Image (cartoon, helix red, strand yellow):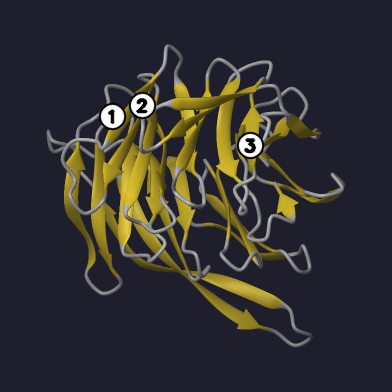
Amino acid sequence: SGDGFGGRVIIWDARSGAELQNYSMPGGLKSMQFSGDGKMLMNVSDEGTVVLIDMVSFKERARQVIADTNVSGGALAIDGKKMILVSRNGKISLWDLAQQTLPGGVIQNRFLMMFEIIDEDQEGRPSPMTSVALSPNVKKVFTGTSGGLMKVFDLSMTEGLTVLHVLPGHESVVTFVNFTTDGYKCASACLDCSLKIWDVARGGKPINTFTDKHEIRGCYFSPDNTFICAAMDSGTVELFDIATGQRVMTFGMHSGRVNCVMFSPNGKFILSGGMDGLVKVWAIQDSSEKESFTGHPNTDITAVSYSADGGEVC
């Protein structure tokens, strides 16, 4: 887990609840993600620092200021070899995370920028980016903005980004975007109290829209792409059936808004981080709270993540 003020990142053992390691980040944490093999953890702060953690040694592979103070999100390729960053000033940049093994088996990474563009809104102004997701096959990029506009890009390692769809579906800040595990659908959560599901190839109108009376801060698809969970301003976590559009379960609650959510790799649990500084684990089977992790007193949890095998949470 990571917080939005002190920049502290904590990794716990998911089974025992023991704290395994913690790290400091300058500024507030905007994004956190494990590589698909679970061997690396990416952390992105709002002032442009990216830290890569080796999950075998729990040592830093790399720490570098590679962007400006407008960073609003980052996404890691499933193989851990590429990373994309977005900023509130419209910048989208793709990075190669070149890896080298030093004597003694120590692994380090270097940040090599592959390209950078300035995306523009419909009036020709830099798009105020707020969120980004990278498809599992690393061929699509999904972005959200503070004005509610979203875009799906085709990503080429040689040609860069090409706009595939413009999706003007929201009326406020898009807080989080996410792809299904097969990459065919994507979701957007928004402060206009809605959560929308989109067809990546077709674009157009959303496949489904879930609405609430509370603002929605985050969302995440289940591993089998059947359900999607949502982080609510009310302090609860909601579970929706994608096919029927029905709300099927409510988990809660945090004492304050929920900022971020994620499914466990086996689909049996949901991880949530809240304004109350707590990270909670909820069981899908009976909606009960299975664990509550502490370590971020008096601060917002802005990012949570499960490792690839579900053995660690942060």
Q: CA distance from mark 2 to mark 3?
A: 29 Å
Q: Choose top left, top right, bottom left or bottom right for residue 4.
A: top right
Ranked by sequence position, the earlier of labels 1 and 2 is 1
Q: Give coordinates of residue 62: x percent, y percent.
A: 63, 65
Q: Are marks 1 and 2 in contact (CB under 8 Å)?
A: yes
Q: Is residue 196 above or below residue 97?
A: above
What kind of element bears circle 2?
loop
Question: Residue at 49% across / 64% down in the picture?
Answer: 78
Horizontally, residue 272 falls left or right of residue 70, namely right
Q: Nearer the viewer, mark 2 or mark 3?
A: 3
Q: Which residue is mark 1?
A: 148
Point out the image quarter for the N terminus.
Answer: top right
Question: Residue at 38% across / 62% down in the picture?
Answer: 94
Ranked by sequence position, the earlier of labels 2 and 3 is 2
Q: Amino acid at mark 3?
A: Ile
Q: Is residue 10 above or below residue 295?
A: below
Q: Nearer the viewer, residue 40 or 63?
A: 40
Q: Give coordinates of residue 270: x percent, y percent.
A: 62, 39
- Residue 154 visible in the current orientation: yes
Horizontally, residue 217 falls left or right of residue 183, namely right
Q: Nearer the viewer, mark 3 or mark 1?
A: 3
What kind of element bears circle 3?
loop
**Which of the labelled discs sits on residue 284, or is there none?**
3
What kind of element bears circle 1?
loop
**Which of the labelled discs sits on residue 173, or is there none?**
2
Q: Amino acid at mark 1?
A: Gly
Ranked by sequence position, the earlier of labels 3 and 1 is 1
